[in-house]
Image (cartoon, grey):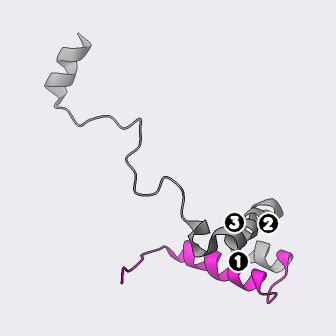
Amino acid sequence: MESIIMSKEKQLQIHTISNLSSGKLSFKEAMNLVGKSERTVRRWLRCYEKEGLSFSQHGNNARKPVNKTSKQSPRCRDRLLT
């Protein structure tokens, strides 16, 4: 079984949306707990009900950014720029 490491913020987000989905919290209570707007909480709830717990994980998670530059030596970089 693979373990998942998440921040306290993500844990609170998942717990809050789970409780909101099960009717244990109102939208106003959920908004106050996570400090987000009603629109964001509604979007999270919609995604939670569609995707399950993976709603909190960003789609680009663990991918290399497409605009990441390589770590070339300064001398090599300067040579390319001149």
Crowd band around label 2 with a 10 angstrom C-alpha radius: few (<14), some (14–19), many (20+): some
The stretch in magenta equals 1-27
Q: Is 44 drawn above or below residue 53 in the view shown? A: above
Q: Amino acid at mark 3?
A: Cys
Q: Find out whether residue 3 is within the magenta segment.
A: yes
Q: Which quarter of the rendered picture does the C terminus lie within?
A: top left
* Precedes in sequence: disc 2 or disc 3: 2
Q: Position of residue 41 (x, y in %)?
A: 76, 67
Q: Which residue matches tag 2?
A: 42
Residue 17 got which mark? 1
Residue 25 got which mark? none
Q: Position of residue 20 (x, y in %)?
A: 77, 81
Dot 2: what SS? helix
Task: Name the residue located 80 percent from the left edge and 85 percent from the top edge.
Answer: 25
Q: Find out whether residue 51 is within the magenta segment.
A: no
Q: Which residue matches tag 3?
A: 47
* Residue at the extreme top: 82
